[in-house]
Image (cartoon, helix red, strand yellow):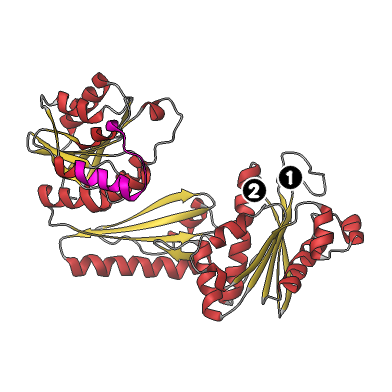
Amino acid sequence: MNGMNIGILVIGNELTSGMTQDTNSSFAARELTAQGWRVSAVMAVGDDISAIKGGLDYLLGISDALVVTGGLGPTADDITTASVAGAFGLGLYTDDTVLRRLKERFVGFNIPWTENNAKQALFPGGAVVIDNPAGTACGFCLERGGRPVTVIPGVPAEARRMLLEGVIPLFRERLGSREQVLRRTIKIFRLTESQIDQELTREDLAIPGVTIGFYPRFPQIRLVITSRGEDAARVEENLKIVEQRITDRLVDYIFGYDDDTMEGVVASLLTDRGLTLAVAESCTGGLITDRLTDVPGSSAFLERGVVVYSNASKVDLLGVPASVIEEHGAVSEETAVLMAEGVRRLGGTDMGLATTGIAGPAGGTEAKPVGTVFVALSSGGGTVCRRYQFRWDRRRIKEMSAQIALDMLRRALSGGDMLT
């Protein structure tokens, strides 16, 4: 690393009260670390002038630069700009260009203008404006003893774009760095952290300048490879070597890289093969269909998705015989198979996917405890069904069931083993 330390300060009563979860600091820390800088500390303070000043003073004492988020809106509790200016003994000025653009945006969005919005065009003296391509409140940068202090809004979608497009380029320009940094994210499903770690001990991954991080994000795990050094060609080559060794070892469990999502991978496979899909969901309550329709162009492959939560709906909409449900239960291999085949037949699709299970916390039996889930996939080659037993709460059981179903579909489309 090049020795640069960056402090992160997040501001807002909603954060310190626990009413809102802070996601900005974790995102900023990941992106700043990926650039080769260290994050010296992360601090959260409320909308309080003395607390903001105290946070700035502390972080500037241990950092070469700061990222500050939150409190740049038009309301009375948005006091960050004034607090930062006061902490540095600076006055405020109105940036006429920003004010004009702000009013133009309100007109373009057909939102009535109120005078308190002009507060978003106030900046400390000497500040350099950081544009906000995703919202109305611009950020700014001040120099404090040769150390840049950047301040951006707290709205996550805005903060992320401004960090990537405004703050990081500014830091690279002002802090300087000869170090080259490349990063690759490998997305893994159906293995735990300990299993992945055990598998990787069988590979030689001790390459100078390369680090590997584990980042669980239920129900998957992201393995992040970071390669650093001053020789760009060597940095890239080292990254490729480690990535290939990990891929060779974990190929059966890798579903994507970097920005890939499970649903996006499935969508690409279906589209590339010109296949269509219908989905019948019971315990997942529409989560599978929701995820698939998040993918642009999903109408090319998704013919229908139905939520058949009750026994009657399984009979009426999918043609599952009532006698099968009575004999085997709604949560059974027999019912799941008929659901997948029924929705495929009704939709006239190439494939039919179905889930049925007990998400809890009640409804389980000794034979079928809470967390019992059946996933079935029907195609021209026949129908397969798998039983799973999950141990989590209701929401996680639903999320895992949806992920399992999509992964079963992905594996089938890829010609791989769908696993048990």
Q: Position of residue 166 (x, y in %)?
A: 21, 50
Mark 1 in CB contact with mark 2 (< 8 angstroms): yes
The structure residue drawn at horizontal position 60% and vertical position 78%, both measured from the top left corner, is 275
What residue did someone put label 2 on?
397
The structure residue drawn at horizontal position 28% and vertical position 62%, both measured from the top left corner, is 207
Is residue 197 part of the magenta span, yes or no? no
Specify start and end residues of the magenta stretch as a single range: 99-116
Q: Quadrant of residue 4?
A: top left
Secondary structure at badge 1 equals loop
Q: Position of residue 140 (x, y in %)?
A: 18, 40
Horizontal arrangement in the rendering, residue 85 relative to residue 28 (left or right): left
Prevailing SS of the magenta stretch = helix
The front one of 370 and 394 is 394
The front one of 79 and 330 is 79
The correct choice, above or below, for 168 with respect to 40 in the image is below
The structure residue drawn at horizontal position 27% and vertical position 66%, both measured from the top left corner, is 238
Task: Please tell me which of labels 1 and 2 falls first in the chain.
Answer: 1
What residue did someone put label 1 on?
370
The correct choice, above or below, for 268 with respect to 224 in the image is below
Q: Three-letter amino acid code at disc 2?
A: Ile
